[in-house]
Image (cartoon, grey):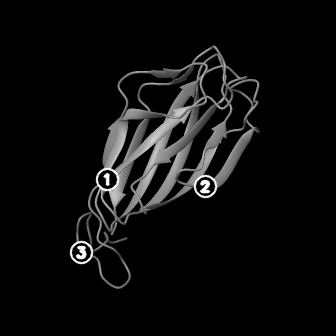
Amino acid sequence: MPWPDWLPGDVITAGRMRASQWEFLQTSADQSVAASTTLVPVPELVIPVAANAIYLIKARLCYGGPPAGDIKVAWSIPSGASLQRNIIAAASGISSADSGSDVVMRRRGGTTEQSAGAVAAGFLSYFEECRLTTVSSGNCQVQFAQQTSDATATILRSLSWLEWLRIG
């Protein structure tokens, strides 16, 4: 089978798009929230975006915490932007990391909070694939909190990551 006639970064015609290379960010330290349902920004997971642009974004968040607290995730996005999120995460109220059938798959808007189950022993993964359309420049940033306030901290683990690609 022959190789494709294009490479990343090439100008593509006939319904294809021009794409640059994927960019990548990851957290270097754990970040925790205890006894709070107020969303907090994740300082290391910020994507600077241009005006009138379209981006594809992938996120993988590793987290753990009290099952009574769970976790919720949302994004802050520039004014006028539209972020469509496709989410796969543990269902709220799971009892262990081995509860393989307890998964939620959902489509959400950018600033809509999505809750996911947490476990105290070990950690879980939370996945998103998104499409961001901007009107103005600014930052696109992950935020998280406890779904239900609990004195035991919910922890966003180090090595959680984002990758993104500008496609338009």
Inspect this view and state whether residue 22 appears: no
The image shows residue 166 at horizontal and vertical percentages of: 32, 61
The residue that mark 3 highlights is 11
The image shows residue 139 at horizontal and vertical percentages of: 34, 49
Assign a secondary structure to mark 3. Answer: loop
What is the quadrant of the C terminus in the image?
bottom left
Which mark is in front, 1 or 3? 1
* Closest to the observer, 80 or 33: 80
Q: Are marks 3 and 2 in contact (CB under 8 Å)?
A: no
CA separation in Å, label 1 and label 2 = 21 Å
The residue that mark 1 highlights is 138
Inspect this view and state whether residue 154 appears: yes
Q: Is residue 129 left or right of residue 137?
A: right
Q: Residue 15 shows which numbered tag?
A: none
Mark 3 neighbour class, 10 Å CA radius: few under 14, some 14 to 19, many 20 or more = few
- Identify the mark nearer the N-term, 1 or 3: 3
Question: Could you tell me the amino acid type at mark 3?
Answer: Val
The residue that mark 2 highlights is 108
Residue at 27 percent across and 63 percent down: it is 8
* Closest to the observer, 108 or 106: 108
Which mark is in front, 3 or 2? 2
Residue at 71 percent across and 41 percent down: it is 103
CA separation in Å, label 1 and label 3 = 26 Å
Depicted 106 relative to depicted 157: above or below: below
